[in-house]
Image (spheres, rainbow, N blue to C red):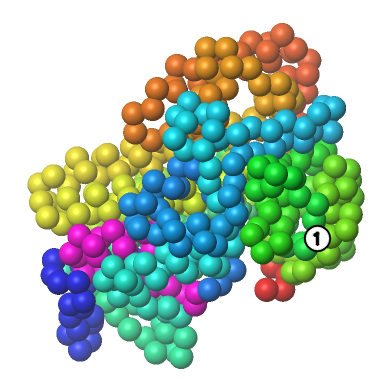
Amino acid sequence: MGGQADHSDTGKESLCDVLVIGGGPAGSTIAALLAEKGHRVTLLEKDRHPRFHIGESLLPANLPLFDRLGVRAQIEAIGLTKRGAEFVSPWHDHHQSFEFADAWDKSLPFAFQVRRSEFDRILIDNAQRKGAQVVQGCRVRKVDLAASRGPRIEAEHEDGRRQSWRSSYLVDASGRDTFLGNRLRIKHRNRKHNSSAVYAHFRGARRNEGKKEGHITIFWFAHGWFWFIPLTDGATSVGMVTWPQYMKTRSGSLREFLLDNIAQCSELAKRLEEAELVTDVEATGNFSYACDHSHGRNYLLLGDAYAFIDPVFSSGVMLAMNSAFAGATAIDISLRNPKQAVGALAEFDRLMKHGPKVFSWFIYRVTNPTLRNMFMAPRNFLRVKEAVLSVLAGDIFGKTPIWGSIRIFKAVYYISALINPSSSIRAWRRRKKNILYVEDQLEVEGR
Ligand SMILES: Cc1cc2nc3c(=O)[nH]c(=O)nc-3n(C[C@H](O)[C@H](O)[C@H](O)COP(=O)(O)OP(=O)(O)OC[C@H]3O[C@@H](n4cnc5c(N)ncnc54)[C@H](O)[C@@H]3O)c2cc1C
């Protein structure tokens, strides 16, 4: 460990304590935290910020993390206040809104909707300000984890120059590129879930009014669901999440496919009646996966580089940042006191598994009629509504007392499913077919 800006260079190889691949929310967060603790951190980002990224709706549980990083005021300045979520179902005659203020812990009443280009830039600038060496336009190409003096990393700058680093620790925060997951062959598709998304920005969409203006709206429709995320500058992010099998039925362009499906979802179509598509339409497929393990002797995986399931509850950025906090603690302990490394990494691993596990129960069932009915008619007996809202707020780490009520919610779900066996079996069969793997044929159009 050394001083903050002391990034030694041996001529052939640059040296650092921790090398981070990727400057998204996970990478920038861990780089800031470790640099603050006095470690020499180098972060390599293949793109240049500001750059587009999907994932614009944040959770209340992000806010304490912003406070700990010292960036809350900056995020607040670029974000639209999100006080809750609205669910709209063609099988129900009302819209159902939830406010985070009604969750178990009343101290986390809102989050933000953000443009990721601005949000990610704030986080990477913060990492640099805290003393991390940030190199943008530099793509990691190769790593050798078995090298005798710690991981050896080879990267390529935009101008074609190659550069090597030697570090004590390597952090993979490369997002859905899953740099180490692919190279170590430890990444596996999620057999319990599978979905694809098509998305774009609109201008002139009709928003909710008053305190609900910043709500995310989820519109269920026959082939999955849509998100509607209002942004602060008047744009609205709209995305369709559907089964890869359904994506395969597309014959025209992505733009036509998105617009045709919006037309099939009448409540969303009404909100977009006067709206204009202002970006290219982009798509991503088969994004549900996890890696076999979260760490090895001198490396760990964060955020999407470890696992991603589905965006329905807007949990990705919060889980990525939370994994960075857990990873920073584990690496700091391991570097300062190697004897405690095993325990620190076991705790890191526990936290990495906890988030996806909690959200996956809800994600796997979100298009199931039983869960949909429960969401559309929420009751707060034995505080189940408050507990579920706490999950939706991302308040699932630390000592939260919600778990008894969550178990009751799940029991009610299973009992309701048993009471309607034919509908449940139909839904189970449909889902089994829907999540089948389909060769990823999506191409990114534009951008
Ligand atoms: C369709 C869709 C909608 C979503 N909506 C939401 C949402 O509303 N809310 C939410 O919270 N989450 C959402 N997510 C998830 C969210 O986008 C991610 O969970 C989040 O961005 C993960 O952060 P990360 O830092 O792990 O990875 P990323 O944000 O992907 O950052 C990884 C970084 O690594 C860089 N990189 C990759 N490979 C290399 C390399 N070899 N060398 C150098 N740099 C590299 C990339 O350029 C990138 O900047 C959504 C995801 C999808 C697919």
Point out the residue furthest to the front here: 210
Residue 66 image offset from top left, x and y in percent: 40, 53
Q: At 26% across and 40% down in the image, what residue appears?
A: 346
Say what amino acid the circle numbered 1 marks.
Gly
Task: Check residue 33 for magenta coloring.
Answer: yes
Q: Is residue 79 above or below residue 294?
A: below
Nearest the eye: 313 or 304:
313
Quarter of the picture holding the N terminus: bottom left
**Residue 106 on image: x %, y %:** 47, 31
Is any part of residue 280 visible from this angle?
yes
Image side of residue 79 versus residue 306, left or right: right
Q: Is residue 227 magenta?
A: no
The residue shown at (24%, 65%) is 35
The residue depicted at 28 percent of the width and 58 percent of the height is: 33
Q: Secondary structure at mark 1?
A: loop
For this rendering, which residue is in front, 75 or 266?
A: 75
**In the image shown, does 47 or 96 lie closer to the viewer?**
96
Q: Quadrant of residue 398?
A: top left
Task: Residue at 34% x, 67% y: name it.
Answer: 127
Q: Dot 1, how many residues are within 10 Å of its Cα: few (below 14), some (14-19), or many (20+)?
A: some
Quarter of the image where the C terminus is located:
bottom right
Q: Position of residue 3 (x, y in %)?
A: 14, 72
In the rendered structure, the answer to whether residue 173 lies left or right of residue 443 reads left
Q: Position of residue 331 (x, y in %)?
A: 23, 54
Residue of label 1 = 204
Q: Which residues are magenta?
A: 25-49
